[in-house]
Image (cartoon, grey):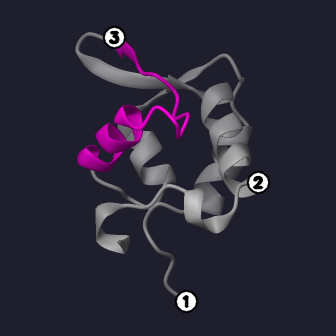
Amino acid sequence: MRKHKGAPDLSELSKLSGLLEDSIIPDTAVRKLFGGICRRTIKRWEDDKGLGFPAPIVIRRRKHRLVREIIQFIRRQYSLPHERRPRSAGAM
């Protein structure tokens, strides 16, 4: 069964929950976590203030996110009605 982009990859999520909550992960890992979404999708989620996607921490021009905030974002999204969950451009 194919998983659509934008849905968290459960195998990646289990790795994420094993990290310390105060640690950070690069956006490449965040994109992989959400099924291989593109950088533009992450940018759209950042621009949508109502979505509540975690703000980046920029280190040497590369974006990272706090693990704790990514986990909170995923939990919030799965407690919302389906219409308000983030979608990638290809899923529209």
Of residue 9 and residue 15, the one placed in the foreground of this image is 9
Is residue 17 rendered to the left or right of residue 50?
A: right
Residue indicated by mark 2: 79
- Say if 2 sits above or below 50 in the image: below
Mark 3 — residue?
59
Where does the image place residue 9, in percent across and percent down from the top left? 57, 61
Q: Quadrant of residue 56?
A: top left
The percent coordinates of residue 13 (x first, y second) are 65, 50
Q: Viewer-proximal residue, 16 or 6?
A: 6
Type of the residue with mark 2? Ser
- Asked if marks 3 and 2 touch (Cβ < 8 Å), the reply is no
How far apart in space, not on screen, are marks 3 and 2 (Cα)?
31 Å
The residue shown at (70%, 35%) is 72
Q: Which quadrant is home to the C terminus? A: bottom left
- Mark 3 to mark 1 CA distance (whole Å): 37 Å
Which secondary structure lies at badge 1?
A: loop
Q: Which element carries disc 3, helix, strand or loop?
A: strand
Q: Is residue 51 left or right of residue 92?
A: right
Residue 22 appears at what percent x and percent y?
A: 67, 16
Residue placed farthest to the top in the image?
60
**Which quadrant of the view contains residue 52?**
top right
Q: Which residue is mark 1?
A: 1
Q: Is residue 59 left or right of residue 8?
A: left
Q: Position of residue 69 (x, y in %)?
A: 63, 28
Residue 8 visible from this viewpoint:
no
